[in-house]
Image (spheres, rainbow, N blue to C red):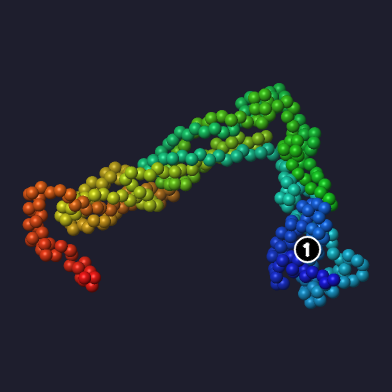
Amino acid sequence: MAKEDYYELLGVQKGASEDELKKAYRKKAVQFHPDKNPGNKQAEEMFKKISHAYEVLKDPEKRAAYDRYGHAAFEGAGAGAPRGPGGGGFHDPFDIFREVFGQQGGGGGGIFEEMFGGGGRGGGGQDGSDLRYDLEISLEEAARGAEREISFRKHVACDRCDGSGAEPGSKKITCPTCRGAGQVRRSGGIITFTQTCPTCAGTGTKIEKPCTQCRGDGRMLKTTKLNVRIPPGVDNGSRLRSSGNGEAGIGGGQTGDLYIVISVKEHELFERQGDDLFCEIPIKFTLASLGGSIEVPTLFGKGSLKIPAGTQSGTTFRLREKGMPSLRGGRQGDQLVRVQVEVPQSLTSEQRRILEEFARISGDASEPTSRSFFEKAKKFF
């Protein structure tokens, strides 16, 4: 029966690099490891094959011999101990596994935690969770900055036991299951690995008499109030971090952080475009024709805008540095003002007489549209 190709077993090309070989082996080793496939003889056999394949291909001399002679390069006396360049036979597949994943002597960590759920820290406690608070503010507050008081519920250290979880006068004792290590050893076939102690959850200690107020958890739910300073320039999705204002840790673990996520209400007049503000302002057709100055609103008070004579509807003007402050301390944005020329809907007899005279003098009666537009549109008539 023909033996399987080592490159095909690992799923790599013949010219694969050392890193590509190791990556492929790690993936296959996790997939076919006997402790992940208990009782599966096919998986166990495949685990041995990929280990042998990796052992050959990771060694430059053995790989060169295999590329030249194939499996014949390693055929020799003694079943299971073939000879090849570099001397010696194949190693135990589990030794190769430990070598690649850095597992020495059955200690916990690395791939063993990933595969079998180990990873107790032996008395280190559990850090508290980070919290999120969604805060809606006005555009004015986003532009000028503000201070707001927020209220939320979170786990805080129990004030009866000071977060220890033990009833006052009681104490913590060494965990009888793990003897203070926070981890217990477990046998998984040939390999012995460690996992978090189920009795003490990795702390290495056990409460002699749990606190009657928090029932041994060391924490309680309470409503907390906090003053939050909002810097000028924040936008939708901006996150403000309040260090140490998340949930309290367990067993001496660190307190989490609070993240305030900003959303800015829509404004009735202004639309934000990055650090710039945009608004539309109606003006009289006489102002557009004759020119002049108008006052325009900004988020920082009134501003003055000069309208040149002959301004057309839809013209956009720029007010420098009247937009939003930069959150990172750069140049302040601008305010863009687009004017819309209003045409009167009703006229007095005097107004009509004057406009008709203006139209006669201007020749509007014979040419109601502009000459440039008429030249472009002639081909459609």
Q: Secondary structure at mark 1?
A: helix
> Residue at horizontal 70%, vertical 27%?
210
Above or below — where is 217 with respect to 59? Answer: above
Q: Residue furthest bottom?
A: 68
Q: Position of residue 197 (x, y in %)?
A: 76, 39
Q: Is residue 341 left or right of residue 124?
A: left
Q: Quadrant of residue 265?
A: top left
Q: Can the viewer see residue 321?
A: no
Q: Can the viewer see residue 50?
A: yes
Within-10-Å neighbours for mark 1: few <14, some 14–19, many 20+: many
> Residue at horizontal 53%, vertical 31%?
224
Q: Quadrant of residue 203?
A: top right
| Amino acid carrying mark 1 in the image | Ile
Q: Quadrant of residue 136?
A: top left
> Residue at horizontal 52%, vertical 33%?
152
Q: Residue furthest top?
A: 169
Q: Position of residue 141 (x, y in %)?
A: 39, 40
What residue does disc 1 label? 50
Q: Is residue 20 left or right of residue 265?
A: right
Q: Name the quadrant of the C terminus.
A: bottom left
Viewer-nearest residue: 364 or 236? 364
Q: Position of residue 280 (x, y in %)?
A: 28, 50
> Residue at horizontal 68%, vertical 29%?
216
Q: Name the quadrant of the N terminus.
A: bottom right
Q: Residue furthest right?
A: 78
